[in-house]
Image (tube, coloured by chain):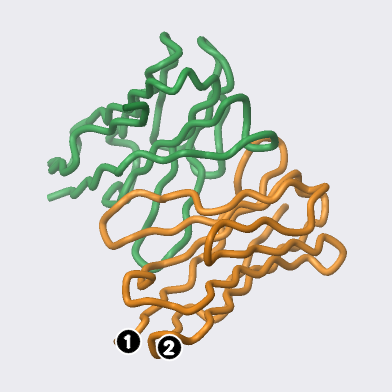
Chain colours: A orange, B green
Amino acid sequence: KQEVTQIPAALSVPEGENLVLNCSFTDSAIYNLQWFRQDPGKGLTSLLLIQSSQREQTSGRLNASLDKSSGRSTLYIAASQPGDSATYLCAGSAGNKLTFGGGTRVLVKP
Amino acid sequence: DGGITQSPKYLFRKEGQNVTLSCEQNLNHDAMYWYRQDPGQGLRLIYYSQIVNDFQKGDIAEGYSVSREKKESFPLTVTSAQKNPTAFYLCASSIIGADTGELFFGEGSRLTVL
């Protein structure tokens, strides 16, 4: 059974610093890895999707990498802003189902 | 605009009552999903459907039921058999399935049992 872990559970950085968020998964037979953002009391917003054949995806200040052999994905957010404060969740797919990590709650201080 | 609409946003239920959460999408997606989120935890899959008139149990289906009579609709019923129903419920959809495309989520429904 796929297990997805995100460490740390919470992270606080000063504005302007780069953010590095980690995601680990136990089963390398994933089809894709997706990163989401969740604001308090809201639904999830898709940030990036990395297919299993890809090693990374980029969108603006966001870059996500995928290393299936080590069971890891990393989300980089460059030059963080207070508006980046949110919970970030990763999820791996297999059998047309997503398994989610517990999320990393990020606070960017002005 | 295309998207996923969940209603109601907030719902209160007395113990012993069944409640139904609505999820409608106009994205023309085949696959739809229901997840449950508890404070400080990740999302857990309740049910999913990849085609009309067909659905499969997820990891925590006990005490829940669903139907998929129309492509755009996937309502979730929380029955009295669900022992701890207070949670945030999220509906999602994808073009075919999670293995081939992004999941898009609604804004969620918060259920509180009084």
Residue B57 is situated, as x and y percent measured from the top left of the image, at: 55, 32
Dot 2: element: strand
Considering only order in the chain, which callout, 1 or 2, is on the residue closer to the N terminus? Answer: 2
Q: In which image quadrant can residue B73 be found? A: top left
* Quarter placement of the N terminus of chain B: top left
Residue B2 is situated, as x and y percent measured from the top left of the image, at: 36, 26
Chain letter, disc 1 residue: A
Residue under the point 62% across and 25% down = B96
Q: Cβ–Cβ below 8 Å for labels 2 and 1? A: yes
Q: In which image quadrant can residue A100 be found? A: bottom right
Q: In this view, does B54 lie to the left or right of B72?
A: right
Three-letter amino acid code at disc 1?
Lys
Q: Residue A72, relative to residue A59: is it above or below?
A: below
Which residue is tagged 2?
A13
As measured in the structure, the alpha-carbon distance from the residue carrying label 2 to the one carrying label 1 is 6 Å
Residue B88 is situated, as x and y percent measured from the top left of the image, at: 31, 50
Q: Residue A56, relative to residue A6: is it above or below?
A: above
Q: Which of B40 and A49 is in front in this view?
A: A49
Number of numbered markers: 2
Which residue is tagged 1?
A109
**Neighbours of disc 2 within 10 Å: few (<14), some (14-19), many (20+):** some
Chain letter, disc 2 residue: A
Q: Nearer the viewer, residue A110 or B33?
A: A110
- Same subunit, tags 2 and 1: yes
Q: Residue A37, relative to residue A52: is it above or below?
A: below
Q: Residue B60, relative to residue B52: is it above or below?
A: below
Q: Nearer the viewer, residue A107 or B83?
A: A107
Three-letter amino acid code at disc 2?
Val
Residue under the point 49% across and 55% down = A36
**Neighbours of disc 1 within 10 Å: few (<14), some (14-19), many (20+):** some
